[in-house]
Amino acid sequence: MNNFGKNFRVSIFGESHGQKIGIIIDGTPAGLPLSNDDFTTDLLRRKSGKRGSTPRLEGDLPEIVSGVYQGYTTGTPICLTFNNHNFNSADYSNLQDWPRPGHADFVSKIKYNGFSDPRGGGHHSGRITIGIVAAGVIAKKLIEPISVEAKILHIGGENPWDDILERAMAEGDSLGGVIECVAKKIPVGLGEPFFDSMESLLSHIVFSIPGVRGIEFGDGFSAAKMFGSEHNDPIIDESGKTLKNGSGGINGGISNGNDLIFRVAIKPTSSISKGQETYNLNSHKMENLKIVGRHDSCFALRVPVVIEASAAIVLADLSNAGRAL
Amino acid sequence: MNNFGKNFRVSIFGESHGQKIGIIIDGTPAGLPLSNDDFTTDLLRRKSGKRGSTPRLEGDLPEIVSGVYQGYTTGTPICLTFNNHNFNSADYSNLQDWPRPGHADFVSKIKYNGFSDPRGGGHHSGRITIGIVAAGVIAKKLIEPISVEAKILHIGGENPWDDILERAMAEGDSLGGVIECVAKKIPVGLGEPFFDSMESLLSHIVFSIPGVRGIEFGDGFSAAKMFGSEHNDPIIDESGKTLKNGSGGINGGISNGNDLIFRVAIKPTSSISKGQETYNLNSHKMENLKIVGRHDSCFALRVPVVIEASAAIVLADLSNAGRAL
Amino acid sequence: MNNFGKNFRVSIFGESHGQKIGIIIDGTPAGLPLSNDDFTTDLLRRKSGKRGSTPRLEGDLPEIVSGVYQGYTTGTPICLTFNNHNFNSADYSNLQDWPRPGHADFVSKIKYNGFSDPRGGGHHSGRITIGIVAAGVIAKKLIEPISVEAKILHIGGENPWDDILERAMAEGDSLGGVIECVAKKIPVGLGEPFFDSMESLLSHIVFSIPGVRGIEFGDGFSAAKMFGSEHNDPIIDESGKTLKNGSGGINGGISNGNDLIFRVAIKPTSSISKGQETYNLNSHKMENLKIVGRHDSCFALRVPVVIEASAAIVLADLSNAGRAL
Amino acid sequence: MNNFGKNFRVSIFGESHGQKIGIIIDGTPAGLPLSNDDFTTDLLRRKSGKRGSTPRLEGDLPEIVSGVYQGYTTGTPICLTFNNHNFNSADYSNLQDWPRPGHADFVSKIKYNGFSDPRGGGHHSGRITIGIVAAGVIAKKLIEPISVEAKILHIGGENPWDDILERAMAEGDSLGGVIECVAKKIPVGLGEPFFDSMESLLSHIVFSIPGVRGIEFGDGFSAAKMFGSEHNDPIIDESGKTLKNGSGGINGGISNGNDLIFRVAIKPTSSISKGQETYNLNSHKMENLKIVGRHDSCFALRVPVVIEASAAIVLADLSNAGRAL
């Protein structure tokens, strides 16, 4: 379903080229100051227009539909909507018959019996994450003094990454990347053993973001190549601080007071203008597809703020932030 | 909380050295043949006693407490319990004061105010996964003809892995590994966009398993280093079959009919007999800890069947298997 | 939280005098024809303007924000919003200091630390049920051929009720009433033993409607005065038809194929223009409160369609309507 | 499903004549003193053996399977089981072919395709409520100083009720009754507007108890016959105390600090030894059924403690008792 969270819960809706998209955020306590301006910074970070990102420009500031009164949250559900505009739906005809590699066109056609909205990916669009970013803005306020920060580690395997990005753009190709997220000042004790482990909840929401291929905590996949004596992380003081933080701030699913650290792999943008041989369900044969229209050559560049928001939402939910301000 | 799943739901309980541990499985339709023998194969695969695994031996066959009548499921909750025995709780004294690196001793002490059961890791023990394996046995029956198979890819980075295992054991050290899970014959259309994506649900339950450090689907972290033209996966026939299955059988969170493929990184066993300098909360200084007792030198070897079970539980939940036999 | 339902799930938001209120409906399968016109009949039934109901008039047709494309549902979340207008917020000043008897003014003040939106009851307003009615329109389509019909049994204890209504209006007083809901053509087997019993789910959503004071199924409270031989309901044919349907179509929490029957008690409208002695938190003494503004003298008259919608939502959820059209 | 509650969650399992029945209770904080003795009083109140109740006698003290260590809760799931014994399953043959009026025999046969456990009602048995009573014992401790007390208001419409009970027993007939539950010292602010209203949650769990036909809060069904000026309840002091508490301690779904009051209608025991003409699915005609075996002539007498437990579970969940001791 379209919900995530138990005590701080978000519910999303909308299609890329519908009239509006939005999110409901439930569990925010009453009395949190909240205005339109609070969203500017994070929404700008996610916004299109930077090099390597699609030039599709929009207003992209939320309309606060409910849950805020005279500049403060009321304690009841907050609904935020965003207008869609400035797009050309003609770009997206015929997707159901000639599904684009890497996109959800084929699965949507089957799952929804041909009734899904194909324009701009419909409900599958990365644009829907704008609501997650907006919810993250509220979550970040709730979890203070915890801070969350995500940044690009590499693009296409390179750091810095200017050259490879130029090359990909020149060739009508695309790139992915890896993002690292770090949260500081987390108290000991958030998360539950087993099904509500910190990693379970974080990975659950992170894999909701279109294009995520992997997630790892602390030493991650490298841990599998270490000896126990290397990966084990001695505690070095009363507060539980560890020497290397190889477990990424989590033991047994529960925060241990060290920095929370995880990395997320983002695939290359699926829409490329370079030709691709792929099956046409109409002509019943492989044909060369060139995707036209405006696309990010590396949408991973816009994802760090979405990852931050996702982490903040989980931390708000686990902190039971909804209960007291 | 201790639950996972919406229409096929499991609830776990128990402590490693308590009298019993167990699981409730809700959402199994009536009329599925089920007997004690059905569990033997998978529980044996998880069982202790192989080289590199702890020699702790137990009966480990479930008691079917409810939900089965005259050899068939009744459609109401199935409770399975397992007796604990053959352990020496004396091994586990003083953990709260001198927490073991890599274990949940420290976080448990804080989170539960010193009231958690320290014996054998208590509720944090990997032993609790025996219930997940048993639930997986039922889930696998429900999702037929879908098959799920997980196997070790490497141990400590090596494949085959006899030498490194010998060496680790000789040195009182431990190893981790990587497991690959493949599910075949999945219909197109399982999973939802965003929060109930196939990857979200699978990663959620997989990170419930103690010791998991990472998960990746299809090309996984490598995808982040590819060009879009490399990672993109052309469809090659009417059924949606793709050329390389780099997306691991999922597009937009929804199964695409190709094999579901994911890999899981398991950390090295935390309990090692090799000495470790770590903080003693009693003496207020770093001291050399040597963990005695019987431990797996590589518990990753026992995890594939737990991963299989986890995947089968998600597939049963998404297939809405609980509704019709 | 603001959600109800497992496989057919509704999420509400909005305040009475905010800009918009609305609902998200998740779990509707793709391909259901749906247009603005489908909502007209039920929304008119709920609408203000009839005798005994408040004359507050509004457009009250939903804006279909998401989940519908070219006249058919897409299978993804449907968001419907309704504009609020034509109100005079000045009517609602000072409520927090001089809370109205029967209203949520006092509890809101405490629960939300004075930050709730007081205008027109804010999120507590009966106006929010417009979203439930709209969701009911969709649910009714999904559960066909099941039909649901609710009607007033009595107003203020009288049937017909013209005289008592005139009298109450003349005196600036108000009335409540009892509504009976009947659903026909329900298959045997909906509902679960215990926590997801048909009665549990129906009563859960019915008590979400502001002003409900009681609910009873079949013989209801009268059953408590009968002998078993009177209340027991013999089965009279192969299909499970019973003689008297005293259990209201449910045994053991599960539909038995007979008509589902329940009755709901609605309290008299709390806002009355007649004076009431009640405590003023500002002056610290009892004072005579006369509530001005437009109010239903018997809002129960508008509730049958809300009850129908609630029943349809539960039946859609239990029928797992979201899975297949 | 078999779960109830969000932050204090219970999961039940078992069949009346299976080996064991039980409950898992999740969300209890660590450090609550808990021993077997704590359950004695409430389980005795529910126990069989009093006049008007079935003489089926059993040990009925719980086995604490998990979640308690050295006399204190550990903060992880508490599993309690109860042995079943002292029954004669032969009493329950042929129920699927000749379903008993008022019982779930017919619906079970259809819903579970003939695979349900027919012995003693199987999972539908009132015996399953023993787990709810045990969970209530824990919940009552958690919500202190809130107290909850339920008692019989009338049996078969009479109070006192000795004569009518004698008469019913003599005639092989049965009786129902009405139970009133009052909770004191509830803080202002528990419950949410709409779907998690206090009444929604209470009615949800109360209708899980087999045999409940109705529930009403405060003035209940009588409110529907009052004028607003009669039912409205003036606030008379700073604390929110009202004059008559006609709303049963709840406004807008939220506790208002006055006593919580609700009443529950229980149907007469369905199993009667008096003959009943009812359809035999085998012989395809109406036949005279005389139910033999031991049965309560008025099981309502045993239900007050189950109602109390249900209310305590909801209050523990809403108080978020699971988070801090």
Image (tube, coloured by chain):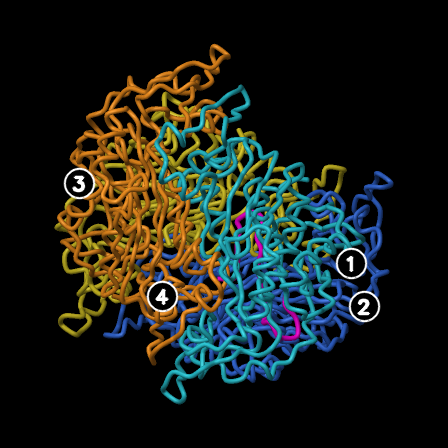
Chain colours: A yellow, B blue, C orange, D cyan
- Taking the spot 58% from the left edge, 48% from the top edge, the residue there is D313
3 vs 1, front mark: 3
Q: Amino acid at mark 1?
A: Arg
Q: Earlier in the sequence, mark 3 or mark 4?
A: 3
Q: Quadrant of the C terminus of chain C?
A: bottom left
D139 left or right of A57 in image = right
- How dense is the environment of label 3, judged by Cα within 10 Å: few (below 14), some, or many (20 and up)? some
Q: Please name the residue that numbered disc 3 is placed on.
A: C61
Compared to residue C278, the image places residue B207 above or below, namely below
A198 left or right of A310 in image = right
- Kindly identify which numbered label has been placed on residue C245: 4
Q: Please give the chain letter of the residue carrying mark 3.
A: C
Q: Earlier in the sequence, mark 2 or mark 1?
A: 2
Q: Secondary structure at mark 4?
A: loop
Q: Please name the residue that numbered disc 1 is placed on.
A: B119
Q: Please give the chain letter of the residue carrying mark 2.
A: B
Dot 3 and dot 2 residues touching (CB under 8 Å): no
Q: Secondary structure at mark 1?
A: helix
- How dense is the environment of label 1, judged by Cα within 10 Å: few (below 14), some, or many (20 and up)? many
